Image: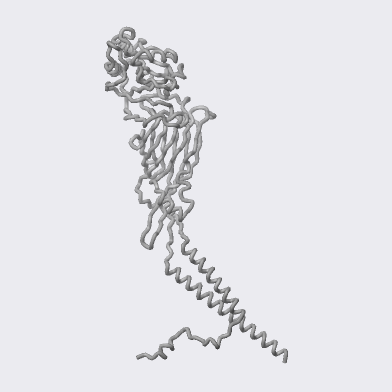
Amino acid sequence: MISSSKIKSVDFYRKIPRDLTEASLSGAGLSIIAALAMMFLFGMELSNYFTVSTSTSVIVDNSSDGDFLRIDFNMSFPALSCEFASVDVSDVLGSNRLNITKTIRKFSIDQHLRPTGAEFHSGPVPHSVKHGDEVDEETVEGAVPLNGVSFDKLSHVYPILVVNFFAPWCYWSIRLKPSWEKTANIIRQRYDPEADGRILLAKVDCTEEVDLCRRHHIQGYPSIRIFRKGSDLREDHGHHEHESYYGDRDTETLVKAMEDLVASIPRENQRLALEDKSNITKRPAPLTGGCRIEGYVRVKKVPGNLIISARSGAHSFDTSKMNMSHVINHLSFGKTISPRLLSDAKRLIPYLGRSHDRLNGRLFINHRDLDANVTIEHYLQIVKTEVVTRKSSREHTLIEEYEYTAHSSLAQSIYIPVVKFHFELSPMQVLVTENPKSFSHFLTNVCAIIGGVFTVAGILDSILHNTIRLMKKVELGKNF
Protein backbone atom coordinates (compact mmCIF):
# COMPACT_ATOMS: atom_id res chain seq x y z
CA MET A 1 0.00 0.00 0.00
CA ILE A 2 1.41 3.41 -1.02
CA SER A 3 1.76 5.78 1.89
CA SER A 4 0.38 9.28 1.80
CA SER A 5 3.87 10.71 2.22
CA LYS A 6 5.01 9.12 -1.02
CA ILE A 7 1.95 10.51 -2.83
CA LYS A 8 2.69 13.99 -1.47
CA SER A 9 6.20 13.77 -2.92
CA VAL A 10 4.82 14.15 -6.46
CA ASP A 11 2.96 17.35 -5.63
CA PHE A 12 4.00 20.00 -8.15
CA TYR A 13 2.20 22.74 -6.26
CA ARG A 14 3.81 22.71 -2.82
CA LYS A 15 2.33 25.17 -0.41
CA ILE A 16 4.13 27.77 1.64
CA PRO A 17 2.63 28.48 5.04
CA ARG A 18 0.71 31.70 5.06
CA ASP A 19 2.67 33.11 7.98
CA LEU A 20 5.85 32.76 5.89
CA THR A 21 4.50 34.92 3.00
CA GLU A 22 4.61 38.67 2.86
CA ALA A 23 2.07 40.92 1.07
CA SER A 24 3.30 44.07 -0.63
CA LEU A 25 1.72 47.11 -2.18
CA SER A 26 3.57 46.57 -5.46
CA GLY A 27 2.41 42.94 -5.56
CA ALA A 28 -1.19 44.03 -5.07
CA GLY A 29 -0.90 46.49 -7.95
CA LEU A 30 0.60 43.88 -10.25
CA SER A 31 -2.12 41.38 -9.28
CA ILE A 32 -4.86 43.85 -10.25
CA ILE A 33 -3.13 44.61 -13.55
CA ALA A 34 -2.66 40.90 -14.23
CA ALA A 35 -6.33 40.18 -13.53
CA LEU A 36 -7.44 42.95 -15.87
CA ALA A 37 -5.03 41.70 -18.53
CA MET A 38 -6.43 38.16 -18.21
CA MET A 39 -10.00 39.44 -18.59
CA PHE A 40 -9.10 41.56 -21.61
CA LEU A 41 -7.21 38.78 -23.37
CA PHE A 42 -9.96 36.26 -22.56
CA GLY A 43 -12.54 38.59 -24.13
CA MET A 44 -10.39 38.99 -27.25
CA GLU A 45 -9.96 35.22 -27.55
CA LEU A 46 -13.70 34.63 -27.07
CA SER A 47 -14.50 37.21 -29.76
CA ASN A 48 -12.00 35.60 -32.11
CA TYR A 49 -13.54 32.18 -31.44
CA PHE A 50 -16.99 33.39 -32.53
CA THR A 51 -15.65 35.37 -35.50
CA VAL A 52 -15.92 33.53 -38.82
CA SER A 53 -12.65 33.23 -40.71
CA THR A 54 -12.39 32.33 -44.38
CA SER A 55 -9.74 31.50 -46.90
CA THR A 56 -10.06 32.62 -50.53
CA SER A 57 -8.40 30.95 -53.47
CA VAL A 58 -8.64 31.07 -57.26
CA ILE A 59 -8.84 27.68 -58.95
CA VAL A 60 -9.76 26.23 -62.33
CA ASP A 61 -13.53 26.03 -62.69
CA ASN A 62 -14.75 22.61 -61.57
CA SER A 63 -18.46 23.37 -61.62
CA SER A 64 -20.82 20.74 -60.35
CA ASP A 65 -23.78 22.12 -62.35
CA GLY A 66 -22.79 20.52 -65.66
CA ASP A 67 -21.92 21.99 -69.02
CA PHE A 68 -24.90 24.35 -69.22
CA LEU A 69 -25.62 27.69 -67.62
CA ARG A 70 -29.06 29.10 -66.91
CA ILE A 71 -29.82 32.73 -67.76
CA ASP A 72 -32.88 34.29 -66.08
CA PHE A 73 -34.18 37.59 -67.41
CA ASN A 74 -37.12 39.97 -67.34
CA MET A 75 -36.99 42.91 -69.76
CA SER A 76 -39.46 45.51 -70.99
CA PHE A 77 -39.42 46.88 -74.55
CA PRO A 78 -41.76 49.89 -74.96
CA ALA A 79 -41.49 49.88 -78.78
CA LEU A 80 -41.15 46.18 -79.70
CA SER A 81 -44.34 44.26 -80.43
CA CYS A 82 -44.85 40.84 -78.83
CA GLU A 83 -46.08 39.70 -82.24
CA PHE A 84 -42.54 39.69 -83.64
CA ALA A 85 -40.34 39.70 -80.51
CA SER A 86 -37.86 36.84 -80.72
CA VAL A 87 -35.32 35.46 -78.23
CA ASP A 88 -32.30 33.87 -79.91
CA VAL A 89 -29.18 32.19 -78.55
CA SER A 90 -25.87 31.46 -80.29
CA ASP A 91 -22.34 30.51 -79.24
CA VAL A 92 -18.82 30.08 -80.64
CA LEU A 93 -19.33 26.33 -81.10
CA GLY A 94 -21.90 26.96 -83.81
CA SER A 95 -25.10 26.40 -81.83
CA ASN A 96 -27.84 28.72 -83.02
CA ARG A 97 -31.36 28.57 -81.59
CA LEU A 98 -33.91 31.02 -82.97
CA ASN A 99 -37.18 32.24 -81.49
CA ILE A 100 -37.11 30.24 -78.24
CA THR A 101 -40.67 29.96 -76.88
CA LYS A 102 -40.80 26.98 -74.51
CA THR A 103 -39.35 28.80 -71.49
CA ILE A 104 -40.28 32.35 -72.53
CA ARG A 105 -43.39 34.37 -71.67
CA LYS A 106 -44.53 37.60 -73.32
CA PHE A 107 -46.88 40.29 -72.05
CA SER A 108 -48.09 43.29 -74.05
CA ILE A 109 -47.26 46.57 -72.28
CA ASP A 110 -47.99 50.22 -72.95
CA GLN A 111 -45.46 53.02 -73.24
CA HIS A 112 -45.41 53.34 -69.43
CA LEU A 113 -44.40 49.65 -69.13
CA ARG A 114 -47.77 48.69 -67.65
CA PRO A 115 -49.28 45.34 -68.78
CA THR A 116 -52.40 45.63 -70.90
CA GLY A 117 -53.77 42.12 -70.59
CA ALA A 118 -53.04 38.46 -70.15
CA GLU A 119 -50.00 36.65 -71.51
CA PHE A 120 -49.48 37.03 -75.24
CA HIS A 121 -49.35 33.62 -76.92
CA SER A 122 -47.52 33.94 -80.20
CA GLY A 123 -48.03 30.29 -81.10
CA PRO A 124 -45.81 28.24 -83.41
CA VAL A 125 -44.00 30.23 -86.07
CA PRO A 126 -44.24 28.68 -89.56
CA HIS A 127 -40.90 28.01 -91.20
CA SER A 128 -42.26 29.07 -94.58
CA VAL A 129 -45.41 30.70 -95.88
CA LYS A 130 -46.83 29.62 -99.21
CA HIS A 131 -47.33 32.40 -101.79
CA GLY A 132 -49.08 32.46 -105.11
CA ASP A 133 -47.38 32.35 -108.51
CA GLU A 134 -49.18 35.38 -109.92
CA VAL A 135 -46.28 37.81 -109.49
CA ASP A 136 -45.76 38.31 -113.20
CA GLU A 137 -49.45 38.53 -114.01
CA GLU A 138 -51.24 41.83 -114.51
CA THR A 139 -52.86 42.78 -111.22
CA VAL A 140 -56.49 43.91 -111.18
CA GLU A 141 -57.19 46.08 -108.14
CA GLY A 142 -59.82 44.51 -105.91
CA ALA A 143 -59.02 45.57 -102.32
CA VAL A 144 -60.40 48.89 -101.09
CA PRO A 145 -57.64 51.39 -100.17
CA LEU A 146 -58.23 52.92 -96.74
CA ASN A 147 -57.12 55.98 -94.85
CA GLY A 148 -57.75 56.99 -91.25
CA VAL A 149 -61.26 58.34 -91.91
CA SER A 150 -62.50 55.56 -94.20
CA PHE A 151 -61.09 52.88 -91.89
CA ASP A 152 -63.10 54.14 -88.92
CA LYS A 153 -66.22 54.36 -91.06
CA LEU A 154 -66.02 50.95 -92.73
CA SER A 155 -64.98 49.11 -89.55
CA HIS A 156 -68.40 50.03 -88.14
CA VAL A 157 -70.27 49.02 -91.27
CA TYR A 158 -69.03 45.55 -92.18
CA PRO A 159 -69.21 42.65 -89.69
CA ILE A 160 -65.80 41.51 -90.95
CA LEU A 161 -63.15 43.84 -92.32
CA VAL A 162 -59.88 42.20 -93.40
CA VAL A 163 -57.06 44.68 -93.99
CA ASN A 164 -53.65 44.17 -95.56
CA PHE A 165 -51.20 46.66 -94.00
CA PHE A 166 -48.32 46.79 -96.47
CA ALA A 167 -45.30 48.79 -97.61
CA PRO A 168 -44.58 49.18 -101.36
CA TRP A 169 -40.84 48.55 -100.86
CA CYS A 170 -41.36 45.32 -98.92
CA TYR A 171 -40.45 42.08 -100.71
CA TRP A 172 -43.17 40.09 -98.94
CA SER A 173 -45.78 42.78 -99.63
CA ILE A 174 -44.92 42.63 -103.33
CA ARG A 175 -45.31 38.84 -103.30
CA LEU A 176 -48.66 39.08 -101.52
CA LYS A 177 -50.17 41.82 -103.69
CA PRO A 178 -51.34 39.67 -106.69
CA SER A 179 -52.91 37.03 -104.45
CA TRP A 180 -54.53 39.62 -102.22
CA GLU A 181 -56.05 41.60 -105.08
CA LYS A 182 -57.27 38.42 -106.79
CA THR A 183 -58.78 37.18 -103.52
CA ALA A 184 -60.49 40.56 -102.99
CA ASN A 185 -62.07 40.34 -106.46
CA ILE A 186 -63.29 36.77 -105.90
CA ILE A 187 -64.78 37.63 -102.48
CA ARG A 188 -66.38 40.77 -103.94
CA GLN A 189 -68.09 38.66 -106.63
CA ARG A 190 -69.30 36.01 -104.19
CA TYR A 191 -70.24 38.36 -101.34
CA ASP A 192 -71.16 41.70 -102.87
CA PRO A 193 -70.41 44.51 -100.40
CA GLU A 194 -73.70 46.25 -101.24
CA ALA A 195 -76.06 43.27 -101.53
CA ASP A 196 -74.45 40.88 -99.01
CA GLY A 197 -72.40 43.21 -96.80
CA ARG A 198 -70.82 40.63 -94.56
CA ILE A 199 -67.15 41.01 -95.48
CA LEU A 200 -64.84 43.49 -97.11
CA LEU A 201 -61.17 43.15 -98.05
CA ALA A 202 -59.11 46.33 -97.88
CA LYS A 203 -55.52 47.56 -97.82
CA VAL A 204 -53.51 50.31 -96.14
CA ASP A 205 -50.25 51.73 -97.45
CA CYS A 206 -48.21 52.27 -94.26
CA THR A 207 -45.78 54.62 -96.01
CA GLU A 208 -48.68 57.03 -96.53
CA GLU A 209 -50.98 56.26 -93.59
CA VAL A 210 -48.28 56.31 -90.93
CA ASP A 211 -50.56 57.30 -88.05
CA LEU A 212 -53.14 54.64 -88.87
CA CYS A 213 -50.49 51.91 -88.94
CA ARG A 214 -48.92 53.17 -85.73
CA ARG A 215 -52.33 53.18 -84.05
CA HIS A 216 -52.69 49.48 -84.83
CA HIS A 217 -49.06 48.74 -83.84
CA ILE A 218 -47.97 47.54 -87.27
CA GLN A 219 -44.25 46.73 -87.11
CA GLY A 220 -43.87 44.05 -89.80
CA TYR A 221 -45.05 44.08 -93.42
CA PRO A 222 -47.36 42.78 -94.65
CA SER A 223 -49.66 42.37 -91.66
CA ILE A 224 -53.13 40.99 -92.36
CA ARG A 225 -55.56 41.96 -89.61
CA ILE A 226 -59.13 40.78 -89.09
CA PHE A 227 -61.52 43.33 -87.53
CA ARG A 228 -64.95 42.29 -86.28
CA LYS A 229 -67.76 44.77 -85.97
CA GLY A 230 -69.15 45.13 -82.46
CA SER A 231 -67.22 42.30 -80.79
CA ASP A 232 -63.89 44.06 -80.88
CA LEU A 233 -64.80 47.66 -80.11
CA ARG A 234 -62.98 48.89 -77.03
CA GLU A 235 -64.00 51.75 -74.77
CA ASP A 236 -60.47 53.16 -75.03
CA HIS A 237 -60.88 55.88 -77.72
CA GLY A 238 -62.83 53.50 -79.93
CA HIS A 239 -59.80 51.41 -80.81
CA HIS A 240 -60.36 47.89 -82.05
CA GLU A 241 -59.02 44.64 -80.75
CA HIS A 242 -58.29 42.37 -83.68
CA GLU A 243 -56.61 39.21 -84.91
CA SER A 244 -53.61 38.62 -87.12
CA TYR A 245 -53.68 36.15 -89.99
CA TYR A 246 -50.62 33.87 -90.19
CA GLY A 247 -51.67 31.33 -92.79
CA ASP A 248 -50.46 30.76 -96.34
CA ARG A 249 -50.77 33.66 -98.77
CA ASP A 250 -51.71 31.99 -102.03
CA THR A 251 -55.09 32.84 -103.56
CA GLU A 252 -56.72 29.49 -102.88
CA THR A 253 -55.85 29.52 -99.16
CA LEU A 254 -56.84 33.17 -98.73
CA VAL A 255 -60.22 32.64 -100.40
CA LYS A 256 -60.94 29.61 -98.22
CA ALA A 257 -59.97 31.57 -95.10
CA MET A 258 -62.29 34.44 -96.02
CA GLU A 259 -65.18 32.06 -96.72
CA ASP A 260 -64.64 30.42 -93.33
CA LEU A 261 -64.95 33.84 -91.72
CA VAL A 262 -68.15 34.64 -93.62
CA ALA A 263 -69.68 31.25 -92.81
CA SER A 264 -70.06 32.27 -89.16
CA ILE A 265 -72.37 35.17 -90.08
CA PRO A 266 -75.98 34.42 -91.19
CA ARG A 267 -76.84 36.42 -94.28
CA GLU A 268 -80.49 37.01 -93.61
CA ASN A 269 -80.22 39.08 -90.45
CA GLN A 270 -76.55 40.19 -90.68
CA ARG A 271 -75.82 39.40 -87.02
CA LEU A 272 -72.53 40.60 -85.63
CA ALA A 273 -69.54 38.27 -85.84
CA LEU A 274 -69.40 37.61 -82.15
CA GLU A 275 -68.32 33.99 -82.49
CA ASP A 276 -65.64 32.59 -84.68
CA LYS A 277 -65.84 28.91 -85.59
CA SER A 278 -63.50 29.14 -88.55
CA ASN A 279 -60.40 26.98 -88.72
CA ILE A 280 -57.88 29.42 -90.17
CA THR A 281 -54.39 30.25 -88.93
CA LYS A 282 -54.80 33.41 -86.89
CA ARG A 283 -54.04 34.71 -83.43
CA PRO A 284 -55.03 37.76 -81.40
CA ALA A 285 -53.00 40.77 -82.42
CA PRO A 286 -51.14 42.70 -79.68
CA LEU A 287 -53.16 45.44 -78.02
CA THR A 288 -50.15 47.74 -77.67
CA GLY A 289 -46.79 48.25 -79.31
CA GLY A 290 -44.63 47.21 -76.34
CA CYS A 291 -43.66 43.87 -74.87
CA ARG A 292 -42.32 42.49 -71.60
CA ILE A 293 -40.27 39.34 -72.11
CA GLU A 294 -39.47 37.09 -69.17
CA GLY A 295 -38.24 33.55 -68.63
CA TYR A 296 -34.95 31.71 -68.92
CA VAL A 297 -32.68 29.97 -71.41
CA ARG A 298 -29.94 27.37 -70.94
CA VAL A 299 -26.67 27.96 -72.78
CA LYS A 300 -23.36 26.15 -73.04
CA LYS A 301 -20.54 27.45 -70.87
CA VAL A 302 -18.69 29.00 -73.78
CA PRO A 303 -18.69 32.57 -75.15
CA GLY A 304 -22.03 33.29 -76.77
CA ASN A 305 -24.85 35.75 -77.35
CA LEU A 306 -28.38 36.27 -76.11
CA ILE A 307 -30.20 38.31 -78.76
CA ILE A 308 -33.65 39.89 -78.61
CA SER A 309 -35.00 41.31 -81.86
CA ALA A 310 -37.95 41.44 -84.23
CA ARG A 311 -37.99 38.29 -86.35
CA SER A 312 -40.28 36.78 -88.97
CA GLY A 313 -39.78 34.54 -91.95
CA ALA A 314 -42.60 36.19 -93.91
CA HIS A 315 -42.49 39.87 -92.91
CA SER A 316 -40.22 42.84 -93.55
CA PHE A 317 -39.36 45.56 -91.05
CA ASP A 318 -38.71 49.26 -91.52
CA THR A 319 -35.45 49.56 -89.59
CA SER A 320 -35.67 53.36 -89.59
CA LYS A 321 -38.73 53.17 -87.35
CA MET A 322 -37.53 50.46 -84.98
CA ASN A 323 -36.50 51.42 -81.47
CA MET A 324 -34.90 48.75 -79.27
CA SER A 325 -34.96 50.80 -76.06
CA HIS A 326 -35.45 48.57 -73.05
CA VAL A 327 -35.51 48.32 -69.29
CA ILE A 328 -33.75 45.39 -67.63
CA ASN A 329 -35.94 44.38 -64.71
CA HIS A 330 -33.81 41.34 -63.94
CA LEU A 331 -30.80 39.54 -65.42
CA SER A 332 -28.85 36.84 -63.59
CA PHE A 333 -26.86 33.69 -64.28
CA GLY A 334 -27.01 30.30 -62.59
CA LYS A 335 -29.49 28.81 -60.20
CA THR A 336 -31.57 31.05 -58.00
CA ILE A 337 -30.18 31.15 -54.45
CA SER A 338 -32.69 31.04 -51.60
CA PRO A 339 -32.66 34.09 -49.29
CA ARG A 340 -31.68 31.88 -46.35
CA LEU A 341 -28.61 30.49 -48.09
CA LEU A 342 -27.66 33.93 -49.39
CA SER A 343 -27.83 35.47 -45.91
CA ASP A 344 -25.77 32.57 -44.58
CA ALA A 345 -23.15 33.20 -47.26
CA LYS A 346 -23.11 36.95 -46.60
CA ARG A 347 -22.10 36.14 -43.04
CA LEU A 348 -18.82 34.98 -44.54
CA ILE A 349 -18.41 37.56 -47.30
CA PRO A 350 -20.68 40.62 -46.94
CA TYR A 351 -20.05 41.75 -50.53
CA LEU A 352 -21.47 38.52 -52.00
CA GLY A 353 -24.45 39.13 -54.28
CA ARG A 354 -23.68 42.74 -55.17
CA SER A 355 -22.75 41.81 -58.74
CA HIS A 356 -25.15 38.89 -59.11
CA ASP A 357 -27.76 41.08 -60.82
CA ARG A 358 -25.95 44.37 -61.32
CA LEU A 359 -28.02 45.38 -64.39
CA ASN A 360 -31.33 45.16 -62.55
CA GLY A 361 -33.39 48.32 -62.93
CA ARG A 362 -31.11 49.82 -65.59
CA LEU A 363 -32.68 51.77 -68.47
CA PHE A 364 -31.21 51.81 -71.97
CA ILE A 365 -33.19 54.31 -73.99
CA ASN A 366 -32.56 55.44 -77.55
CA HIS A 367 -33.81 59.01 -77.77
CA ARG A 368 -33.14 59.01 -81.53
CA ASP A 369 -29.98 61.05 -80.99
CA LEU A 370 -28.11 58.49 -83.08
CA ASP A 371 -30.84 58.40 -85.73
CA ALA A 372 -32.10 54.97 -86.87
CA ASN A 373 -30.72 51.40 -86.92
CA VAL A 374 -29.38 51.57 -83.37
CA THR A 375 -28.27 48.29 -81.83
CA ILE A 376 -27.76 48.16 -78.05
CA GLU A 377 -25.02 45.78 -76.93
CA HIS A 378 -24.07 44.56 -73.46
CA TYR A 379 -20.72 42.86 -72.90
CA LEU A 380 -20.80 40.64 -69.81
CA GLN A 381 -17.84 38.90 -68.17
CA ILE A 382 -18.97 36.21 -65.75
CA VAL A 383 -17.01 34.77 -62.82
CA LYS A 384 -18.24 31.95 -60.65
CA THR A 385 -17.97 32.25 -56.86
CA GLU A 386 -18.24 29.08 -54.80
CA VAL A 387 -18.78 29.35 -51.03
CA VAL A 388 -18.28 26.39 -48.70
CA THR A 389 -19.79 26.86 -45.24
CA ARG A 390 -19.16 24.38 -42.43
CA LYS A 391 -21.46 23.73 -39.49
CA SER A 392 -19.09 21.12 -38.08
CA SER A 393 -15.90 19.37 -39.11
CA ARG A 394 -17.86 17.14 -41.51
CA GLU A 395 -21.04 18.97 -42.52
CA HIS A 396 -20.82 21.65 -45.19
CA THR A 397 -23.13 23.62 -47.47
CA LEU A 398 -22.12 24.55 -51.00
CA ILE A 399 -23.34 27.85 -52.50
CA GLU A 400 -22.64 28.59 -56.16
CA GLU A 401 -23.17 32.07 -57.52
CA TYR A 402 -22.30 33.71 -60.82
CA GLU A 403 -21.33 37.37 -60.68
CA TYR A 404 -20.60 39.54 -63.68
CA THR A 405 -19.35 42.87 -64.89
CA ALA A 406 -21.24 44.75 -67.59
CA HIS A 407 -20.29 47.29 -70.23
CA SER A 408 -22.97 48.65 -72.55
CA SER A 409 -22.94 50.67 -75.76
CA LEU A 410 -25.26 51.99 -78.46
CA ALA A 411 -24.07 51.71 -82.05
CA GLN A 412 -25.54 52.09 -85.50
CA SER A 413 -25.82 49.00 -87.65
CA ILE A 414 -26.55 48.30 -91.29
CA TYR A 415 -28.74 45.38 -90.21
CA ILE A 416 -31.99 45.22 -88.28
CA PRO A 417 -31.56 46.72 -84.78
CA VAL A 418 -31.24 44.20 -81.95
CA VAL A 419 -30.43 44.00 -78.26
CA LYS A 420 -27.41 41.76 -77.82
CA PHE A 421 -25.96 40.36 -74.61
CA HIS A 422 -22.49 38.98 -75.31
CA PHE A 423 -21.44 36.80 -72.39
CA GLU A 424 -18.08 35.22 -71.67
CA LEU A 425 -17.33 32.94 -68.72
CA SER A 426 -13.98 32.96 -66.93
CA PRO A 427 -12.16 29.59 -66.88
CA MET A 428 -11.25 30.31 -63.25
CA GLN A 429 -13.50 30.46 -60.22
CA VAL A 430 -13.23 32.02 -56.77
CA LEU A 431 -13.41 29.50 -53.91
CA VAL A 432 -14.28 30.86 -50.47
CA THR A 433 -14.01 28.33 -47.63
CA GLU A 434 -15.06 28.80 -44.03
CA ASN A 435 -12.36 27.72 -41.57
CA PRO A 436 -14.01 26.20 -38.49
CA LYS A 437 -12.43 26.67 -35.05
CA SER A 438 -12.38 23.83 -32.52
CA PHE A 439 -13.42 24.33 -28.90
CA SER A 440 -10.28 22.52 -27.71
CA HIS A 441 -8.15 25.11 -29.46
CA PHE A 442 -10.12 27.83 -27.70
CA LEU A 443 -9.54 26.15 -24.28
CA THR A 444 -5.82 25.78 -25.01
CA ASN A 445 -5.52 29.48 -25.80
CA VAL A 446 -7.44 30.44 -22.66
CA CYS A 447 -5.11 28.30 -20.50
CA ALA A 448 -2.11 29.83 -22.24
CA ILE A 449 -3.44 33.33 -21.50
CA ILE A 450 -4.03 32.61 -17.81
CA GLY A 451 -0.71 30.80 -17.29
CA GLY A 452 1.28 33.27 -19.33
CA VAL A 453 -0.09 36.36 -17.62
CA PHE A 454 0.29 34.77 -14.19
CA THR A 455 3.90 33.78 -14.90
CA VAL A 456 4.88 37.14 -16.39
CA ALA A 457 3.24 38.96 -13.49
CA GLY A 458 5.16 36.75 -11.03
CA ILE A 459 8.46 37.50 -12.75
CA LEU A 460 7.77 41.23 -12.72
CA ASP A 461 6.74 41.10 -9.07
CA SER A 462 9.96 39.24 -8.15
CA ILE A 463 12.10 41.74 -10.05
CA LEU A 464 10.30 44.67 -8.49
CA HIS A 465 10.44 43.20 -4.97
CA ASN A 466 14.19 42.40 -5.15
CA THR A 467 14.95 45.82 -6.59
CA ILE A 468 13.18 47.52 -3.70
CA ARG A 469 15.01 45.36 -1.15
CA LEU A 470 18.37 46.14 -2.78
CA MET A 471 17.64 49.84 -2.73
CA LYS A 472 16.79 49.64 0.96
CA LYS A 473 20.08 47.83 1.72
CA VAL A 474 22.03 50.49 -0.16
CA GLU A 475 20.31 53.21 1.87
CA LEU A 476 21.08 51.37 5.14
CA GLY A 477 24.79 51.03 4.13
CA LYS A 478 25.09 54.75 3.54
CA ASN A 479 23.69 55.50 6.97
CA PHE A 480 26.46 53.45 8.63
Relative vertical location of residue 412 with respect to residue 73 in this rendering, above or below: above
Q: Quadrant of the C terminus?
A: bottom right
Position of residue 134 measured from the top left corner of the image (x, y, whole percent) = 32, 15
**In which image quadrant can residue 463 be found?**
bottom right
Colour style of the rendered protein structure: one colour
| Residue 384 appears left or right of 458 | left
Q: Nearer the viewer, residue 429 or 31?
A: 31
Q: Is residue 172 visible?
A: no
Q: Quadrant of the N terminus?
A: bottom left
Which residue occupies the extreme front position in the image?
19
**Numbered disc total:** 0
Q: Nearer the viewer, residue 369 or 396?
A: 396
Which residue occupies the extreme top position in the image?
195
Which residue occupies the extreme bottom position in the image?
480
Position of residue 196 measured from the top left corner of the image (x, y, whole percent) = 30, 9
Position of residue 207 measured from the top left corner of the image (x, y, whole percent) = 45, 18
Q: Nearer the viewer, residue 9 or 416?
A: 9
Which residue occupies the extreme right position in the image?
479
Q: Is residue 351 visible?
A: yes
Relative vertical location of residue 411 with respect to residue 398 in this rendering, above or below: above
Position of residue 12 measured from the top left corner of the image (x, y, whole percent) = 46, 84
Q: Nearer the viewer, residue 336 or 62?
A: 336
**In which image quadrant can residue 130 be found?**
top left
